[in-house]
Image (cartoon, rainbow, N blue to C red):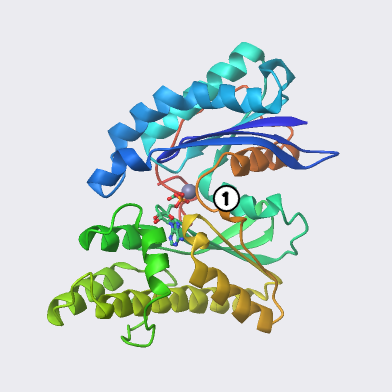
Amino acid sequence: MLILGIETSCDETAAALIERGSSNRVLSEKIKSQIPLHARYGGVVPEIASRSHLEYIDLITDQVLKESGRTMKEIDLLSVTNGPGLIGSLLVGLSFAKGLSYQNQIPLVPVDHIFSHIESVFIDHPDIAYPLVALVVSGGHTSLFFQKSKFDRQLISKTRDDAIGEILDKIAKFFGLGYPGGPVLDKIYHSGDPACFTFTLPRMSDGSNDFSFSGYKTAVLRLAKEKHILSESQLFTDLIASFLHSIVDYLLLKTTEAVNQYSAKSVIVAGGVSRNSLLRKKFQDVFNRKNIPTYLPLPEFCTDNASMVAWMGYETFNHYPDRNYFDYYLNAYSRSYSRESGKHR
Ligand code: KG4
Ligand code: ZN
């Protein structure tokens, strides 16, 4: 089966063609990153993002078909991200996919961006054991799930304030280190002393299981101000190393608690921040010692891509064969799924 995936939820315009069934592989993936457009603002500007998606979506899709030597007529299934994300950006991909579906009479599967990130790990690890705990860490999301199976998921924790990637990007922006901040801070970490500063791990005063990251941003900025730390100094490098060390420990603590509580057999960490070298090493080391296999996406599938969207679309189509996949009233949603109401927020 040939599946074309389309991803435009934030600042990457991506299309991918995958093959599933007798063989399971990515035939072609093209990503047009908008980083140069947003870098001068230190973050994603939604209007610029939508306009750029509009400019490139058909070009990127054509390139994917050309590179894999296929035509639209050969595609069996379309898969598109319809939320959560920037609403204008999502609507570009969704409208484009609806057009392809209608014109070529190909079923169209809408997929959730967060669940696609989790699915990205299955591209090269098809046999991950359930039940599992999945942590999604990205620029827009920080969520922890318990999964009895691929489609039986329970949200354990989400962030109360900023997402972890957002904190990394904001700190980098404040110190004039460029956008996105995650990769820059990742590099700095390796020249710093992670034991130089200590941070208190956040705990919710109402006893809730949620994450909170905004205190980290305040603490880093306060320490830099109080100790007159300049961004070129060794002390700054030590501050960033200590901060990253603590924030990864915080993620590890929350994930370990969930693994113990739910007796999980495996751990998944996915999303843009799962590309972080310290996070990858620490999660592998800690859970390997506990004999809990831990899976992270290949580096190219950590940040937003369309292969994970196509992969998720195929799984959804097979799991729910009776749904209407020619539903052109389908809408986009900006906020993630609510644990309490079961509705999109
Ligand atoms: O998954 P993603 O591409 O977009 C969202 O769904 O939000 O994640 C983007 C985030 C950005 O905040 C970026 O700074 C972060 O991933 N990121 C990293 C690294 N590479 C990208 N964070 C830490 N270390 C990295 N190496
Ligand atoms: Zn993402």
Q: Which residue is painted at 58% across and 25% down in the image?
A: 63
Residue 269 location, quadrant:
bottom right
Circle 1 is placed at which residue position? Answer: 300
Along the viewing direction, whichever of 193 and 143 lies nearer the viewer: 193
Q: Is residue 87 left or right of residue 151?
A: left
- Callout 1 amino acid: Glu
Mark 1 element type: helix
Residue 320 location, quadrant:
top right
Q: Is residue 171 above or below residue 113?
A: below
Mark 1 sits near ligand 1, with its Cβ under 8 Å away: no
Along the viewing direction, whichever of 75 and 336 lies nearer the viewer: 75
Q: Is residue 52 above or below residue 206?
A: above
Residue 81 at what x, y percent from top left? 52, 37
Ligand 1 shows up in which quadrant of the image? Answer: bottom left
Numbered label tally:
1
Q: Is residue 325 visible?
A: no
Q: Is residue 174 above or below residue 293?
A: above
Residue 171 at what x, y percent from top left? 27, 63
Q: Is residue 32 left or right of residue 281?
A: left
Q: Quadrant of the N terminus?
A: top right
Q: Is residue 123 visible?
A: yes
Q: Give the farthest residue toward the right.
A: 22
Give neighbour class at mark 1: few <14, some 14-19, many 20+ (Cα, 10 Å). few
Residue 233 location, quadrant:
bottom left
Q: Which residue is painted at 47% across and 73% down in the image?
A: 251
Residue 215 at what x, y percent from top left? 27, 72
Q: Which residue is painted at 32% across and 80% down in the image?
A: 238
Residue 188 at what x, y percent from top left? 37, 69
